Each structure stands twice: as structure tokens, then as C-alpha cells.
Image (cartoon, grey):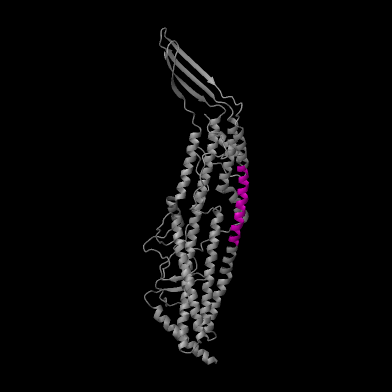
Amino acid sequence: MTRSGNAARGGIARWGILGLLCLTGCGGTGRRITFDPRGRIDVLGSQPLVGAAREPSTGNETRTPASPRPGDTIPASDRHRTHEVARVALEEEGEPQTPVVAMAEWLEDREGAEPAPVAAGGLAPLSLEDLRQIAVSRNPTLEQARAQVAQAQGNWLQAGLYPNPTVGYEGGANNAPFDAHGGFVSQNIVLGDKLGLNRAVASCDVQRAQWEAQAQRLRVVNDIEIRYVAALGAQRQVAVTSELLKFASEGVRISEKLLEGEQVARADVLQARLQQSQTRILLRNAEVQAHAAWKQLGTILGWNDFPLRPLEGDLEDLVPDVEWETAYSELIGGSPLIHAARSRAAAAMVQVRREQAEPIPNLQVTGSVGRDFLTPQFMMYGLQVGVALPVFDRNQGNIAAATAELATAQAEVSRLELSLRDQLAATFQRYESAYNEVETYRDSILPTARDNLQLTQQGYEEGEFDLLRVLTARRDLTEANINYVKALTELRIAVVEIRGMLLTGGLDAAPSNPIGSNGAGQSSGAGN
């Protein structure tokens, strides 16, 4: 075909496109698609799914646990403070968007397809902090954690109570049957500071329960932010994929008209239809993912029928840089799991002392008074003082069990530190990979795809390229945006996990709080 033929074909195609755009672009909807310099796609004239940028969260409210009991505070974080904990327990938006191309409305009716999530009319946007407040009041695992702290505080109260006295009646026979009657009072006097040691062990248990409650709260908060980011990403994917389907549908429509004018071959039409079908699959998958992300967000909030609402914030909000050494130092120094493990080790240390004090016998004191009612009548008084001699049972088994529990608890602290370092390495690798992808797409791939689209459009207007070449360039730009959104979502999730002490699983049951720290065996009570 000659140069003049190419020009004629380009002129026919351009007039055809102009006619289609006039018919479809001037309707009542007034929607158009724009690309801004950062590669973001916006559908103007449609109801937004995201609003203003969210306010940054300081995160300070999740770093300081509640006190173990009235008047107590949890000691500052330190990797090697097991002995100190035991001692304390014993003492007591941006650039303007430039329109590039205006597209037609949907050209294919997708009846029967479930629509993507859209904002409910008239509802105010939800911020991340709003979602956190909803979860605090509705998530059942947080109620479990609070109840377990209350259980530990009840155990602390009970562990230090003095044994009750015993009051009774006694009758006897001196000169005749049952001629003497009286009463007695018996009291166990606890020696060896057993009650104080009981309270010290229970105080460490309260600290451990509070750190575990703090860990559960972080799990819920982190899961909320992760699912919030996933919902934003899924909504963005639906918008981007919708534009890709529009490009594909426009390509089918125009290629069919060009085929009628014998401007293209039938193979070009089949290729356009193939791209359209493949894009429909992508859009359907994106819609399913968006619905699932919203349902999961409602589930972590404890709200089964969570209504669709617009969300404040944007995936491209400032993502902080994360350094390995800083992240590792904050993890080891601030992880509630490590603090809970250290509290367990401190309780085990005090438990050893408690078991060693058990052989110290308690003083058993009984006082009685009575009267012989036969002549001559007289009063009777009695006093008994006794101790249990630790001859055979010196609590050897419980001391050995408590010592082994101490070794286990101290080793658990070291094991947990290594385990968290290993988890951080894997999460940090995801962060670095996603960060590299985001930078590459933002600084290289998306600008290149935009330049390619601009040059291709210019070449098409000059008759150098055909229409399918233009549509392919548009598809490449949209697919690059899809991959950019995926990488950005993964980056934001990785940052949440790192800054959230690697704690996820906001619907997992809160760890149960056993009554005693020493599961291997301990004395049943100081007053027995």
C-alpha cells in the first residue's frame, strides 16, 4: 500500500474515532479517563472510592502496656533483665492531571456480573483510625485478652491471702459422760515469706498477661491496616482493569468498522477480540478480589455485614524507609512477645525460691477453753503449738521441676529472639523486593510506557502505525499500572508487618493464661 493509501486509511480511521467519541463522550455521564505524570489512572466524573490522605498514626498507643495491678508498672525494655524483673516483683495530593485521551462508555453489556464495591451514597469516608476504634469495641479476641488480664490480677489477689482460722466445738468426759464442753480456735501461721513469694510469682504472671494482651491488640491493629491497604489496592485494581477493558472493547469496535471498510485483515479483528476476552477475565478477578478484601476487612472488625463505605487515604501515601538495623533493634527491644517471655522467666525464677521456701514449716497454733459441769465445776484451758517436720518430704520434686522450668523459660527468650530475627529477614526481603519494583515502575517503566503511547499516537496520526498498535501501547501502559499497584500494595503490607513487630492474626484466639507460671509442678498453697 502506498504512502497516500496509508494517509487515506489513517484519515478514515481518525474520522471514525472522532465520530464514536462524539456520540459516546458527550452523553449524560461525562466520564473520562486521565493519566497523571505519576502513572495514576483516574475516572473523572465517577464517585470516588478514596478520599483525602489519611492522618499518620504515631503508633505510641501500642507500645506501653497497662500496669499489672494498681500501683505497679511494667519495667522498661531490656534484653537481659530477667533478674531485674524478678527483683522488682519480689520488692513489689500533588500535581494537576493532564488529560491524554477520552474514551467511550462501556461498549459491552456485562449483565449478570456482580458489580465492584462502590461507596454508599451519603456516607462519610472512613479513616484508618476509625477502623481501629471500631475493632477495639467489636473484635472478640481483644475481649478475651482483657479477661485474661483480669484473671491474672484475680490470681495475684488470691495468692497472697492469709489462710482462714478454724473454729470448733469439743466435748469430753472427765467424771461422767460428756460432762466437759468447750470450744477451740486454730490458726496456721505462715512462715518463710511464702505469701510474699506467691504474690511475686503472680505479679510476673500479671505482667505476662498484659504483654500478651498488648501483642493481641497489635495483631488486630496490624491486620486492620493490612486489610485496609488490601481494600485500597483492590479498588485501584478494579479501576485500572476497567480502563484496560475499555481499551480492548474500543479496539474491537474500531477494528470491526475498519474491517467493513477493508482497511484491516480479519486476523486483526480476531486478535482484538482475544485481548478483550482476556481482559474481561482480569476485570472479573479484580472485582472478586475487591469484594473479598472488603468482606475480610469487615470480619477483622467483628462486623459481618460491614456496609460499603469510601475509604480515606491512598496507596501512594508516603511510605517510610525501613533500615534493617533499626527494624531489628526496635523488634528485639519492643516486641510484646519477648517481654512476655521475659516475664515468664522472671516468674520461674521467683517460683524456684518459692519452692525452696516450702519445706520451712508453718506454725500450727490451737487454743481451747472449756468447763466441767459436774461438781466440783472448774474451767479448762488448752494451747497447742506444732510444726510439720520436713523429714521425708522436703519438696525436692517441685524444686527440681521449678528449676527445669526456669531453664526452659530462659531458653525460650533466646529462641524467640532468633525466631523473630528469622521472620524479620523474610519480611524485610519482601519489603526490599517490593520497594525495588515500586521504584522501577514509578521511575522507569511507567514513564517509558507513557512516552511509548505518546509516540505511537503521534505516529498513528501521521499514518506510520495502525490502530491496533495504538491500542497495544495503551494496554501496555495499563498493565504496567496494574503491576505497579500490586507492588505498591505488597510494599505497604510489608511495612505494616515490620513496624507492627511482625504480629498478625487478629482473629486467632488470644493465648490462654495458665493459673501458675510453673506448669511442671508447684506447691498448692502456702497455708496448707
Drawn side of residue 77 relative to residue 179, left or right? right
Q: Is residue 308 above or below residue 420?
A: below
Residue farthest along the front direction in this orientation: 177
Nearest the camera: 300 or 359? 359
Residue farthest along the top direction in this orientation: 376
**Residue 370: image x %, image y %?**
44, 15
**Residue 131: image x %, image y %?**
44, 55
**Residue 385: image x %, image y %?**
53, 20
Q: Which residues are magenta?
A: 408-432
Nearest the camera: 458 or 213? 213
Drawn side of residue 30 relative to residue 484, left or right? left
Image quarter hosting the N terminus: bottom right
Picture quarter containing residue 308?
bottom left
Residue 300 visible from this viewpoint: yes
> Which residue is at a point 44% across and 71% down the rendered structure image?
43
| Figure label count | 0
> Which residue is at a point 55% across and 77% down the rendered structure image?
452
Q: Main secondary structure of the magenta part?
A: helix
**Residue 354: image x %, image y %?**
58, 33
User: Is residue 217 located in the magenta-colored stretch of the structure?
Assistant: no
> Which residue is at a point 63% across and 44% down the rendered structure image?
411
